[in-house]
Amino acid sequence: MEIKAYEKLPKEAKDIRKEVFVDEQGFKNEFDDIDNTAIHLVCYDNEKPIGTARIFYDEELKSYHFGRIAVIKSYRGKGIGRELLNFAEKIVKEKGGSSLSLSAQERVSGFYLKQGYEKQGEPYLDEYCPHIFMTKNL
């Protein structure tokens, strides 16, 4: 398994996000302007793209933000999400960041709790899906 970072949204990341968020989960507003400035991560298994995520600096929060994490169905439960998150944390530390925030789908917030993230505030809806804001000091 290998993770690569890209300065522009690669086709592999776009395809995975479309498959997971649009086709499987029914989200409509998957792609946005942040994609133009974010660092995009793609995880490969023998050159096959299997997972993706993005990182960007959020001026309003004064923190790096991790999001759009998606793993294709046949690779879920194999630690790919954890590897992407660890890779993102490493990049943020290298850039001098001291914290990482994210907006987790509430149903998977336990995954982030296990990785050291803490819930902030109350759950909210994003495209009719309950989310919770979470942060971690690095």
Image: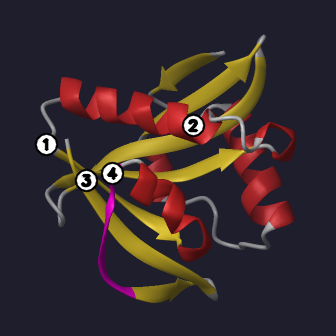
Q: Residue at point 36% right, 72% down?
A: 133
The picture places residue 39, in percent across and down from the top left corner, at 42, 35
Q: Secondary structure at mark 1?
A: loop
Residue beneath disc 1: 98
Q: Amino acid at mark 4?
A: Gly
The answer to whether the residues at label 3 and label 4 have Cβ atoms under 8 Å apart is yes
> Between marks 1 and 2, how big is the CA–CA gap?
25 Å
Classify residue 86 by image quadrant.
top left
Over which residues does the magenta segment extend?
Answer: 116-122
Query: In this orientation, which residue lies closer to the viewer: 6 or 48?
Result: 48
Q: Secondary structure at mark 4?
A: loop
Q: Residue at point 43% right, 67% down?
A: 103
Q: Secondary structure at mark 3?
A: strand
Outermost residue toward the front? 114
Residue beneath disc 4: 116
**Quadrant (top left, top right, bottom left, bottom right) of the N terminus:** top right
Q: Amino acid at mark 1?
A: Ser
Q: Is residue 122 above or below residue 104?
A: below
Q: Amino acid at mark 2?
A: Leu
Front: mark 4 or 1: 4
